[in-house]
Amino acid sequence: MEKRVDAMGMTCPKPVILAKKEMDKSRPGDVVMVQVDNEVAAENLRKLANSQEADYEMRKLGEKHYEVKITVKKEGSSREEKEPEYISCVPQGQKNTVVVISSDKMGEGDPELGQILIKGFLYSLTQLEKLPDTVLFYNKGAFLTCEGSPVLEDLKTLEKEGVRICTCGTCLDFYKMKEKLAVGTIVNMYVITETQAKADLIIKP
Amino acid sequence: MREKKEKLVVAFLTTTQAMAAEKYCQKNQIPGRIIPLPSEISAECGIAWCAEPEEEEQIRQAADNGEIQAAGIYRVYLYP
Protein backbone atom coordinates (compact mmCIF):
# COMPACT_ATOMS: atom_id res chain seq x y z
CA MET A 1 0.00 0.00 0.00
CA GLU A 2 1.23 3.45 -0.80
CA LYS A 3 0.48 6.47 1.33
CA ARG A 4 1.14 10.01 0.33
CA VAL A 5 2.08 12.88 2.59
CA ASP A 6 2.17 16.36 1.15
CA ALA A 7 4.45 18.33 3.42
CA MET A 8 5.30 21.06 0.92
CA GLY A 9 5.59 24.42 2.62
CA MET A 10 5.66 22.86 6.06
CA THR A 11 8.37 23.70 8.49
CA CYS A 12 9.94 20.90 10.39
CA PRO A 13 9.38 18.96 12.48
CA LYS A 14 5.97 18.75 10.82
CA PRO A 15 7.01 16.66 7.79
CA VAL A 16 8.67 14.16 10.13
CA ILE A 17 5.65 13.99 12.46
CA LEU A 18 3.25 13.42 9.57
CA ALA A 19 5.48 10.80 7.97
CA LYS A 20 5.94 9.02 11.30
CA LYS A 21 2.18 8.92 11.82
CA GLU A 22 1.72 7.17 8.47
CA MET A 23 4.61 4.80 9.15
CA ASP A 24 3.10 3.83 12.51
CA LYS A 25 -0.09 2.79 10.73
CA SER A 26 1.80 0.86 8.06
CA ARG A 27 2.62 -2.77 7.52
CA PRO A 28 5.92 -4.13 6.22
CA GLY A 29 6.23 -3.40 2.52
CA ASP A 30 4.03 -0.33 2.65
CA VAL A 31 5.40 2.79 1.12
CA VAL A 32 5.10 6.34 2.47
CA MET A 33 5.75 9.01 -0.16
CA VAL A 34 6.51 12.42 1.29
CA GLN A 35 6.79 15.63 -0.70
CA VAL A 36 8.89 18.34 0.94
CA ASP A 37 10.31 21.63 -0.27
CA ASN A 38 13.68 21.67 1.42
CA GLU A 39 16.71 19.50 1.82
CA VAL A 40 16.77 19.69 5.60
CA ALA A 41 13.31 18.15 5.80
CA ALA A 42 14.43 15.41 3.39
CA GLU A 43 17.49 14.79 5.55
CA ASN A 44 15.38 14.59 8.71
CA LEU A 45 13.11 12.08 6.97
CA ARG A 46 16.19 9.99 6.21
CA LYS A 47 17.02 9.99 9.92
CA LEU A 48 13.47 9.01 10.72
CA ALA A 49 13.64 6.13 8.21
CA ASN A 50 16.96 4.97 9.67
CA SER A 51 15.61 5.03 13.19
CA GLN A 52 12.69 2.86 12.06
CA GLU A 53 14.92 0.56 10.00
CA ALA A 54 12.95 1.55 6.92
CA ASP A 55 14.34 2.01 3.41
CA TYR A 56 14.86 5.56 2.26
CA GLU A 57 15.04 6.97 -1.23
CA MET A 58 15.08 10.62 -2.19
CA ARG A 59 14.59 12.29 -5.55
CA LYS A 60 15.03 15.96 -6.22
CA LEU A 61 12.18 16.93 -8.50
CA GLY A 62 12.80 20.64 -8.66
CA GLU A 63 14.52 23.59 -7.09
CA LYS A 64 12.26 23.37 -4.06
CA HIS A 65 10.70 19.98 -4.42
CA TYR A 66 12.02 16.75 -2.96
CA GLU A 67 10.23 13.42 -3.03
CA VAL A 68 11.08 11.01 -0.28
CA LYS A 69 10.11 7.35 -0.52
CA ILE A 70 10.11 5.44 2.74
CA THR A 71 9.53 1.71 2.54
CA VAL A 72 8.39 0.36 5.87
CA LYS A 73 10.09 -2.84 7.02
CA LYS A 74 8.57 -3.39 10.44
CA GLU A 75 5.08 -3.30 11.79
CA GLY A 76 4.26 -0.14 13.69
CA SER A 77 6.96 1.54 15.65
CA SER A 78 8.67 0.22 18.70
CA ARG A 79 8.86 2.51 21.62
CA GLU A 80 12.25 1.42 22.85
CA GLU A 81 13.94 3.02 19.89
CA LYS A 82 15.99 6.02 20.48
CA GLU A 83 14.61 9.22 19.08
CA PRO A 84 16.62 10.08 16.01
CA GLU A 85 18.59 13.27 16.31
CA TYR A 86 17.11 15.64 13.83
CA ILE A 87 19.25 18.36 12.46
CA SER A 88 18.35 21.99 12.86
CA CYS A 89 15.11 22.91 11.18
CA VAL A 90 16.59 26.03 9.71
CA PRO A 91 18.94 25.05 6.92
CA GLN A 92 22.49 25.93 7.89
CA GLY A 93 23.69 29.06 6.19
CA GLN A 94 20.22 29.91 4.98
CA LYS A 95 19.17 31.92 7.98
CA ASN A 96 17.76 35.28 7.15
CA THR A 97 20.23 37.52 8.92
CA VAL A 98 19.62 41.21 9.46
CA VAL A 99 22.18 43.65 10.82
CA VAL A 100 20.79 46.75 12.52
CA ILE A 101 22.97 49.86 12.75
CA SER A 102 21.41 52.62 14.83
CA SER A 103 24.46 54.80 15.35
CA ASP A 104 27.61 55.91 13.57
CA LYS A 105 29.54 54.57 16.54
CA MET A 106 29.78 51.16 18.14
CA GLY A 107 28.99 51.07 21.83
CA GLU A 108 29.03 53.76 24.46
CA GLY A 109 32.23 55.47 25.44
CA ASP A 110 34.93 57.44 23.73
CA PRO A 111 33.50 58.69 20.41
CA GLU A 112 36.75 58.21 18.52
CA LEU A 113 36.98 54.61 19.69
CA GLY A 114 33.30 54.13 18.83
CA GLN A 115 34.03 55.19 15.26
CA ILE A 116 37.04 52.90 14.96
CA LEU A 117 34.90 50.04 16.24
CA ILE A 118 31.99 50.60 13.84
CA LYS A 119 34.46 50.83 10.95
CA GLY A 120 35.99 47.56 12.06
CA PHE A 121 32.59 45.97 12.50
CA LEU A 122 31.34 46.85 9.03
CA TYR A 123 34.61 45.64 7.51
CA SER A 124 34.26 42.37 9.42
CA LEU A 125 30.82 41.89 7.88
CA THR A 126 32.51 41.68 4.48
CA GLN A 127 34.71 38.89 5.86
CA LEU A 128 31.83 36.67 6.98
CA GLU A 129 31.60 33.45 5.06
CA LYS A 130 27.83 33.83 4.90
CA LEU A 131 27.00 37.47 4.37
CA PRO A 132 23.91 38.97 6.03
CA ASP A 133 20.80 39.44 3.90
CA THR A 134 20.09 43.00 4.94
CA VAL A 135 21.82 45.81 6.80
CA LEU A 136 19.45 48.45 8.18
CA PHE A 137 20.62 51.94 9.03
CA TYR A 138 18.63 54.39 11.07
CA ASN A 139 19.04 57.51 13.19
CA LYS A 140 22.75 58.44 13.38
CA GLY A 141 23.49 55.17 11.59
CA ALA A 142 22.12 56.80 8.44
CA PHE A 143 25.30 58.88 8.22
CA LEU A 144 27.21 55.72 7.39
CA THR A 145 25.47 55.25 4.04
CA CYS A 146 25.95 58.85 2.95
CA GLU A 147 28.78 60.71 1.25
CA GLY A 148 31.75 61.21 3.51
CA SER A 149 31.14 57.99 5.40
CA PRO A 150 34.32 56.10 6.26
CA VAL A 151 32.66 52.76 5.49
CA LEU A 152 31.20 53.41 2.03
CA GLU A 153 33.63 51.05 0.31
CA ASP A 154 32.71 48.17 2.60
CA LEU A 155 29.00 48.86 2.15
CA LYS A 156 29.43 48.94 -1.62
CA THR A 157 31.26 45.63 -1.42
CA LEU A 158 28.38 44.15 0.55
CA GLU A 159 25.82 45.54 -1.89
CA LYS A 160 27.75 44.13 -4.83
CA GLU A 161 27.57 40.71 -3.15
CA GLY A 162 23.79 40.95 -2.92
CA VAL A 163 23.34 42.34 0.59
CA ARG A 164 20.44 44.79 0.85
CA ILE A 165 21.61 48.10 2.26
CA CYS A 166 18.60 50.03 3.58
CA THR A 167 18.54 53.46 5.14
CA CYS A 168 15.66 55.03 7.02
CA GLY A 169 14.06 57.77 4.91
CA THR A 170 12.72 59.73 7.87
CA CYS A 171 16.25 59.90 9.27
CA LEU A 172 17.81 61.06 6.00
CA ASP A 173 15.09 63.68 5.81
CA PHE A 174 15.58 64.83 9.39
CA TYR A 175 19.35 65.19 9.02
CA LYS A 176 18.88 66.74 5.54
CA MET A 177 21.03 64.00 4.00
CA LYS A 178 18.63 62.62 1.39
CA GLU A 179 20.69 63.97 -1.49
CA LYS A 180 23.85 62.52 0.02
CA LEU A 181 22.84 58.86 0.12
CA ALA A 182 25.72 57.02 -1.56
CA VAL A 183 24.83 53.34 -1.24
CA GLY A 184 21.69 51.22 -1.04
CA THR A 185 18.08 52.30 -0.96
CA ILE A 186 15.77 54.44 1.14
CA VAL A 187 13.14 52.53 3.13
CA ASN A 188 10.27 53.47 5.40
CA MET A 189 9.45 52.31 8.91
CA TYR A 190 7.26 49.46 7.63
CA VAL A 191 10.19 47.93 5.79
CA ILE A 192 12.46 48.48 8.80
CA THR A 193 9.95 46.77 11.08
CA GLU A 194 8.96 43.99 8.71
CA THR A 195 12.57 43.15 7.81
CA GLN A 196 13.36 42.66 11.49
CA ALA A 197 10.13 40.79 12.19
CA LYS A 198 10.92 38.31 9.42
CA ALA A 199 14.55 37.83 10.40
CA ASP A 200 15.88 34.58 11.88
CA LEU A 201 18.78 36.42 13.36
CA ILE A 202 19.30 40.08 14.18
CA ILE A 203 22.78 41.41 14.79
CA LYS A 204 23.01 44.75 16.55
CA PRO A 205 26.53 45.91 17.34
CA MET B 1 31.46 32.88 -5.58
CA ARG B 2 33.66 35.14 -3.47
CA GLU B 3 37.32 34.29 -3.29
CA LYS B 4 39.86 35.34 -0.73
CA LYS B 5 42.90 37.22 -1.95
CA GLU B 6 46.32 37.56 -0.42
CA LYS B 7 46.80 40.79 1.51
CA LEU B 8 49.59 42.35 3.44
CA VAL B 9 48.66 42.90 7.07
CA VAL B 10 50.71 44.94 9.49
CA ALA B 11 50.12 44.36 13.20
CA PHE B 12 50.86 46.85 15.96
CA LEU B 13 51.35 46.70 19.68
CA THR B 14 48.88 49.48 20.40
CA THR B 15 45.86 51.10 18.77
CA THR B 16 47.67 54.44 18.87
CA GLN B 17 50.54 53.01 16.82
CA ALA B 18 48.04 51.67 14.30
CA MET B 19 46.36 55.05 13.99
CA ALA B 20 49.73 56.76 13.62
CA ALA B 21 50.63 54.32 10.84
CA GLU B 22 47.31 55.09 9.13
CA LYS B 23 48.13 58.79 9.23
CA TYR B 24 51.65 58.15 7.92
CA CYS B 25 50.42 55.98 5.04
CA GLN B 26 47.72 58.45 4.09
CA LYS B 27 50.20 61.31 4.12
CA ASN B 28 52.66 59.38 1.99
CA GLN B 29 49.96 58.00 -0.30
CA ILE B 30 50.66 54.39 0.55
CA PRO B 31 47.36 52.71 -0.32
CA GLY B 32 45.72 50.57 2.33
CA ARG B 33 43.30 50.70 5.17
CA ILE B 34 42.71 49.97 8.82
CA ILE B 35 41.02 46.64 9.54
CA PRO B 36 40.45 44.66 12.74
CA LEU B 37 43.44 42.38 13.29
CA PRO B 38 42.57 39.11 11.50
CA SER B 39 42.14 36.11 13.79
CA GLU B 40 44.75 34.23 11.73
CA ILE B 41 47.41 36.52 13.17
CA SER B 42 46.18 36.84 16.72
CA ALA B 43 43.08 36.23 18.74
CA GLU B 44 43.78 39.45 20.56
CA CYS B 45 41.66 42.47 19.88
CA GLY B 46 43.39 45.09 17.87
CA ILE B 47 43.52 46.99 14.65
CA ALA B 48 45.90 46.43 11.78
CA TRP B 49 46.91 48.04 8.52
CA CYS B 50 45.85 46.13 5.43
CA ALA B 51 47.41 46.72 2.02
CA GLU B 52 48.11 44.99 -1.26
CA PRO B 53 51.14 42.65 -1.18
CA GLU B 54 52.96 44.98 -3.61
CA GLU B 55 53.24 47.57 -0.85
CA GLU B 56 55.40 45.30 1.29
CA GLU B 57 58.73 46.89 0.42
CA GLN B 58 57.50 50.43 1.05
CA ILE B 59 55.95 49.44 4.37
CA ARG B 60 59.03 47.48 5.48
CA GLN B 61 61.14 50.52 4.75
CA ALA B 62 58.87 52.76 6.79
CA ALA B 63 59.05 50.23 9.62
CA ASP B 64 62.84 50.02 9.41
CA ASN B 65 63.14 53.81 9.44
CA GLY B 66 60.94 53.95 12.50
CA GLU B 67 58.24 55.90 10.65
CA ILE B 68 55.72 53.28 11.68
CA GLN B 69 55.92 51.02 14.72
CA ALA B 70 55.06 47.61 13.29
CA ALA B 71 54.92 44.59 15.55
CA GLY B 72 54.76 42.21 12.61
CA ILE B 73 54.11 42.07 8.88
CA TYR B 74 52.05 39.18 7.56
CA ARG B 75 50.39 37.76 4.46
CA VAL B 76 46.77 36.79 5.04
CA TYR B 77 43.99 35.65 2.70
CA LEU B 78 40.96 37.92 3.05
CA TYR B 79 37.78 38.55 1.10
CA PRO B 80 38.33 41.53 -1.17
Image: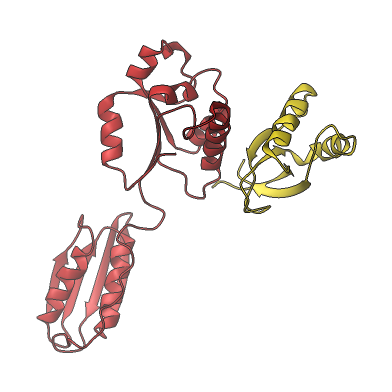
Q: Residue placed at 88% from the left, 36% from the top?
A: B61
Q: Residue placed at 47% from the left, 35% from the top?
A: A107
**Total residue callouts:** 0
Name the foreground residue: B67 vs A147.
B67
Q: Is residue A179 left or right of residue B65?
A: left
Q: Colour of chain B?
A: yellow
Give how far across and how far down residue A20 sits, in percent. 17, 75
Give how far across and how far down residue A144 sits, in percent. 49, 25
Give how far across and how far down residue A56 sits, in percent. 29, 78
Name the foreground residue: A49 vs B61.
B61
- Chain painted red: A
The quadrant in which the C terminus of chain B is found is: top right
Rendered view: A58 above or below A188: below
Rendered view: A107 above or below A138: below
Question: Furthest residue to the left?
Answer: A25
Q: Is residue B35 left or right of residue A68?
A: right
Residue A60 figure quarter: bottom left
Give how far across and how far down residue A40 sits, in percent. 32, 63
Tell me the colour scheme of the image: by chain
Question: Furthest residue to the front?
Answer: A109
Q: Residue placed at 26% from the left, 70% from the top?
A: A68
